Image (tube, rainbow, N blue to C red):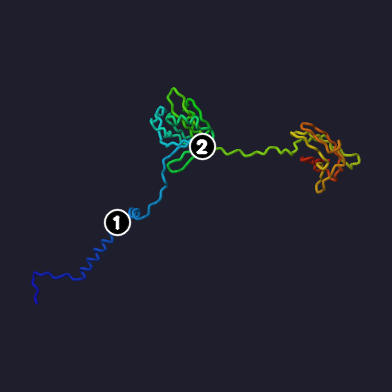
Amino acid sequence: MTQPENQSTPKSSSTVRTARWIIIGLCLAALSAGAIFLGPQLTNIFAPPIPTPQCVQPTLTLGAAKFRIESIARAADGSLALPSGSPDVAYWVEGANINYVFALIPAPNNLALETTLKSGDEATIVWADCGSEEYVIKTVEVGQPDDSSLFDQSAAGITVFVQASSSAESLIIRSGRPEAPPADTPGPDENEIQAEVSFLETTASPDGATVRLSISIKNTGPTAFSLAMDEISLTAENAAPLAPLGVEPALPREIQPGASETFSITFPRPAVNTAVFKILDFSVDIFF
């Protein structure tokens, strides 16, 4: 049968499939481009939230008193104008970053710090990032603040002043870093002998069999001590200690604090020319 001339011929199925694949390809390309440009945003949308440090209101604590910290700048002439009506605020003066300077208004609770604070109390700053710095109060005094010392930045610390009128004195509180406690220094042992030993003469006998040592002992300690025979010896190298053959005056003998005694001690002469003489806790090389 002959088709009417005005009826169009349907497209082949292969042409339709080709068109569909072209459309799908274009869609995929568009999605890929969107992923490239929107990747970070998409990640932020679907990724779990990243925890951040807790932020807090910075505070200054002086003993038992606690204040909120707010910053304030000095005027061009160095003056400081504090807002009124904020007795619980410590105004940190901008630029004071080593010795932190804070100003308080002269409210009754702030003026009372003169009597409630004392040397040794704690002073603590807690910053907005939760970091803290600890100090110890050194002085609490009343006087005219001197800017050169008030804002001195040569040493770490905290200086707090309660601002007063020009005719009145201000309360000034100074704090510094905690100091390590001093190490315990042991006192002198009550049983330790404190003495000075001086050699007066060393003499060998004519036959060379003995040697005599003359010494002086002064008691420099606070208590008396006694000298005994077994506290005296003469020892040559690689030899056993030699005990005295005799001591004049005879031992034991007590020596009082501040007193001096002279002794003549006789030993067998060692076979060598040097030996170590020991008396009490003192020892010295002797040459013959």
Of 1 and 136, nearer the camera is: 136
Secondary structure of residue under mark 1: helix
**Whether label 2 touches label 1, CB < 8 Å:** no
Quadrant placement of the C terminus: top right
Q: Picture coordinates of residue 20 (x, y %)?
A: 23, 66
In which quarter of the view is residue 214 placed? Answer: top right
Q: Picture coordinates of residue 206 (x, y %)?
A: 91, 39
Whether residue 210 sits left or right of residue 161 in the image: it is right
Whether residue 181 sits left or right of residue 143 in the image: it is right
Quadrant placement of the N terminus: bottom left
Q: Picture coordinates of residue 117 (x, y %)?
A: 50, 32
| Residue appearing at x 79%, y 31% in the figure | 259
Residue on which the image places disc 2: 122
| Residue appearing at x 43%, y 26% in the figure | 164
Q: Does the rendering let one see residue 207?
A: yes
Q: CA distance from mark 2 to mark 1?
A: 59 Å
- Tell me: residue 196, above or below residue 26: above
In which quarter of the view is residue 287 placed? Answer: top right
Callout 2: few (<14), some (14-19), or many (20+) C-alpha neighbours within 10 Å? some
Residue on which the image places disc 1: 34
Whether residue 170 sits left or right of residue 17 in the image: it is right
Name the amino acid, label 2.
Answer: Glu
Whether residue 287 sits left or right of residue 99 in the image: it is right
In which quarter of the view is residue 35 placed? Answer: bottom left
